[in-house]
Amino acid sequence: MNRRSFLKSAGASALFAGGRLAGARAAFAQTAPRPLPLIPMKDLTGGINERIPLHLKVGRHDFGNGVLSDTFGINQEYLGPVLRVKQGQTLPFDVRNDIGDTSTLHWHGLHIPGDVDGGPHQEIEQGQVWSPDVPIVQHASMNWFHSHMHGKTARQTYTGLAGVLLVEDDASLSADLPKTYGVDDFTLVLQDKMFGGDGKMAYELSGEVFEDGFEADTLVINGAIAPVAQEVPSGLIRLRILNACNARFLTLSMATGPVTVIASDGGFLSAPVETAEIVMSPGERYEILVDMRQAESNALNVAYDEGGLGFLVNLFGGSQTLTALILQRSSRKGFTGSMPKQLANLAPPRPYDATVTRSFELQMDVGADLAALALAWDNFCGNAGAMAINGLPMQMDRIDEEVRKGDTEIWRISVDDQLHPFHIHGCSFRILTQNGAPAPAYAQGWKDMVHVEEGWSEVLVRFDHTAPADAPYMYHCHILEHEDCGMMGQFTVT
């Protein structure tokens, strides 16, 4: 029985009565909220006159507990900027690596050729500069960029190598929606962190971490320990949300009223979807609207997945949710429009267009001693081959699938154990089934993430850019420790 299943049993309270529980209860204690940090935004939609520098660097950052932690950052001490760009542009990046180790920078969600995708084959050595020209061809969407260094993706991303890339197009720029950054339009990067006895951010592998992925006990938003608070104007408020956790699924709800979802990974839905909650796997993005005309305040609540701390706290009589972001209405003027009724022209998926069906089984158990592996590999997994897809652990010199450019395909994903999020590079897709059932209405738009635990999930996908054998695309579990340990494959598009 895997750990998540075990936590559903009555024995979970006994197992966690000591040790991490004290930290869990402390993390969920409601303290005075900190101000919401506003991630610096670089707006490039008006034009690009020079190369865009992205500096991967070593930093020191206070998450709000008064202690400086050793971090990585991109152009700053922790995390990267929000880059706002426009469809039709080509982004001339200069990515300099000064973190003291080899790294990469992957443009998660972008529809781009394999040779500029930033996957494991585009390594940037310490002190070197990678200069890709990245074309922006897709419609408005929320994407992100993060380390994809094979074997070290989890540690480098957790330490801070992650940023947000917002693609706009003519329709989104003219849409009657909130779009004033830091006033009625906010980007939220959600992460979970572990802090040691000295108050510093900690990351350490173990057999348990290899199995479940790194799941920490403290929620952080834009680099600040939650809860955080923000004054906002009366009217509609737009929240663009990224789950940048290594492994933890998050369930989001509002303290008052439903969650109104307007966009998923790959762009706008056809119309707003109201739902009691949304489930976000690691790597997923959603955009929501909050109506501040009727209430003085509202709050975004976050509950951890069933194997996480929200469940543990609930066992002991505490709240199952954490107040993450408090929105307090002010007299400041913001967006004055009404809730939209229509968003994008989104045709139903056409599975009968598919000419190829491929199957992928994500496999946890390939006979590896995960505890011994954690000790032997000193905080990274590399080519240990502890996990696999279709029986084959990731190998940099092996192409697993060959796809023909322009073909429509069905990809069927299943698992041999526990819950896994699945990501495909270079595309957006439509979910046909998730865990053998229709996806929630808020996940029926364009996506590049799908999760599966029971039965299988199926997506309808088409690849419109090339990825040669020396710069292939990846498909992988987006629990970053699983990806590092071999639950990843490579494919070409020709």
Image (cartoon, rainbow, N blue to C red):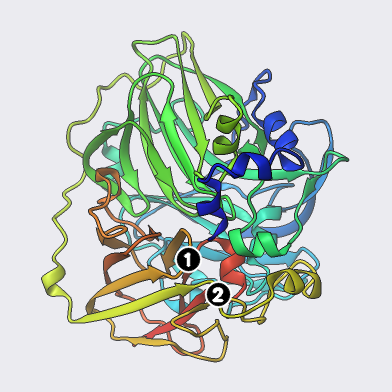
Q: Is residue 292 left or right of residue 7?
A: left
Which kind of residue does numbered mark 2 sit on? Asp
Q: Nearer the viewer, residue 106 or 303?
A: 303
Indicate left or right for 208 with 282 as reference. right
Residue matched to label 2: 365
Can residue 46 be seen here? no
Given residues 422 and 47, the one toward you in this image is 422
Q: Determine contact: label 1, label 2, CB under 8 Å.
A: yes
Where, by quadrant of the figure, is residue 21 drawn? top right
Residue located farthest toward the right when viewing the structure as drawn: 198
Q: Position of residue 258 (x, y in %)?
A: 32, 26
Residue matched to label 1 = 417
Query: Image quadrant of residue 157?
Result: bottom right
Which residue appears at 55% of the width and 82% of the height?
393
Kind of residue sitting beneath label 1: Asp
Expressed as whole percent of the image width and height from the top left, the position of residue 122 reads 59, 77
